[in-house]
Amino acid sequence: MSGTTGTGPVGGGAPAAPSGIPGAAPLLVVDDLSTTFSSPRGKVRAVDGVSLSLERGRTLGIVGESGSGKSVLSRSIMGLLPRSTAERTGSILFGGNDLTTFGDTEYRRLWGTEMAMIFQDPMTALNPVMKVGHQITESLRHHLDMDKATAKETAVELLRSVRIPEPEKRYSTYPHEMSGGMRQRVVIAVALACGPKLLFADEPTTALDVTVQAQVLDLLGVQQRERYMAMVLVTHDLGVVAGRADQIAVMYAGRIVEQAPTRSLFADMKMPYTEALLSAIPKLGDPPHTRLAAIGGRPPDLVNPPAGCPFAPRCPYARDRCREERPELRAVAGDPEHLFACHYPVDSPETLETKDRLAVEALMAGAPHLADRPAGPATAEGTHGR
Amino acid sequence: MTEHTEAETPGLGLAPSLMVEAEAAGIGIGDTPPTGPGGKRKMGLGAWLAVVWLVGLLLLAIFAPLLPIPDPTKSFPEIARKGPTAGHLLGGDALGRDLLSRIIYGGRSSFAVGIGAVAFGLLIGGFIGLVTGFFRGRVDTILTPVMSLLLAIPQFVLALSLVTVLASGDDVTSSRRLGVVILGLGIVSIPILGRITRANTLSWSEREFVTAAKAMGAKSWRVMLREVLPNVVPAMLSIAMLGVGVAIIAEGGLSVFGVGVQLPTPSWGNIIAENRGNLRTSPHIILFTSIVLFLTVLSLNYLGDVVSQRFDVREGQL
């Protein structure tokens, strides 16, 4: 089972099965979800009209920079935000129930057994004064009514399945005796303990050393396939989701600004923000000392969001219309699964024209790194760098 | 290893007994060196001396009736106001009672007051602090201002009035008086201990592992007791150590006003208060008692610091 269902998702959507498999009802359907926080300055719309759906066995990548609402979105669905300050509207259908009507008591039936979350920072996601084994057996004993011995056995098995060496020994160590990568594996084991159907991974590798990031992500992929879970992978790094998600949603200022199956997103990117995120990743082929293509400016104030496109102030291709009229999410012609919210997508004639103009301006201003690089200085820098 | 003993024991119930804790802290810290790679934090000489002093004094106080010392209430007219002699190592007090014996028996009352009051304050204040800090919301908005209000009343006056009202008559038995002194000082310590517990609970409750436990379906009370409390305990322990010292001194203050531990039962406070008239003629009485009192409070403060430093280091490591 895991073999046949597994190959599709892992190949980064290579033979991308359509996300709406006929007959398979999605596990999670979020419709027009908004989450607002009351703050002294007014209402903060951290998540604004987000809709998405996810089937079992598939991975949705949510990408965006800090403050784009991606973590709030996953915590809204998980019901982990304080009820007193966070208000959710819209609907979250999970297994036939609308989670927006759920309180802690109802959620407690789902937490751990139906849905679980892997937290960003393994340094703080584990209790420093509890042995790692106990942190796993707690929920096993509580939810699955296991006796002590069975729970311990299961926990050791879990530790082994997340590739912790000498799991029996590690069972009775404290978090501070482990490295960051090991701890994140423990965090994953804790989340997987009760066999959740839906797993949220909230920046699972951000706090980790790059060398272990890939290991942890691969491990998540394996576990997801073996357990046939639906997974929401939240990250700020498009590179992380590129090979691992079936579907990617790019968030900006609390909204989804582009959503598509992974392959079509990378093949035919529409939103300048997505493009900017992608070009912010340093490439191996870049000559040494290449300036990073950072996105200038900051995300908008969510208390008083701008009237037009929220990305307009930072968008190099923005025009007057972008600042006045908010673009709605619409489908790409001929690809109903590829949605984007932009008046002038990156391949529109207007934007291509702006791109040309910017390149010329950059050359004239003597900033060659913004335009196509002339061969001379780049090689000089290259030899210097060696 | 050591963190285990330190954190789990009190985690089962609030501070079972401070006496045990003082020892546990000492022993716990003490066996850090042999643990090899983990044993980088050695306990300094000062901390060892403090532990030895406190444990020794506690043992003397507990086993006082078995020691070859005279009855602390028996008078020997020949040593009245006299300094140390062969049979009476610390000399006698104004009424000719053996000072060493009075100080050892006085330790019983003083430790009982100090430990009892802080245990009481920690039990109630700690609980209030934990609940208000963890649940916030309505409990917090009601209880925390009340605590601040209590804190604004002069502590000593409050304790003094409590003891005066509840146990001042001549017919009051000495055990009742002791109980009331413990209660009075305990009540006074509630808001202080409560606030410190609350502040620590607040910061620990923000940690992601608390959300993680919730996200795994643990009930709030369980999260509070299993996840937050064990992390708050070191801070509570550290402040409790200081608190014991403060309570012992406060009992002395009450004694000056005649409402400390009831004479003839000795306490360090009432030995000093009773003999303060003879300070000029026989200073040894107050001198010896004060030295014992001073070293005890110093040891408690020092150990409190050691505990809090250990806990800081541990937090920094994470």
Image (cartoon, rainbow, N blue to C red):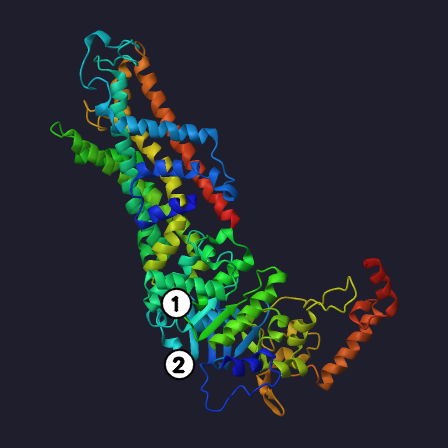
Give the image location of residue B34, x and y in percent.
47, 38
Both on one chain, marks 1 and 2? yes
Under tag 2, what secondary structure?
loop
Q: Residue at x 38, y 72 (%)?
A: A110
In the image, what residue type sits under mark 2? Gly
**Residue that lies at the very extreme toward the left in this rendered image:** B171
Image position of A376 (left or right of A18): right
Q: Which mark is residue A83?
A: 1
Under tag 1, what secondary structure?
loop
| Residue toward you, B309 or A48 | B309
Q: Which mark is residue B101?
A: none
Q: Chain of mark 1?
A: A
Q: Which residue is under mark 2?
A: A95
Q: Which of pointers 1 and 2 lies earlier in the amino acid sequence?
A: 1
Q: Residue at x 21, y 24 (%)?
A: B65
| Residue toward you, A44 or A112 | A112
**Residue that lies at the very extreme toward the right in this rendered image:** A376
Give the image location of residue A89, x and y in percent.
43, 77
Q: Residue at x 68, y 69 (%)?
A: A280
Toward which corner of the image does residue A11 lie, by quadrant? bottom right
Using the image, determine if residue A33 lies above or below residue B80.
below
Give the image location of residue A48, x and y in percent.
51, 76
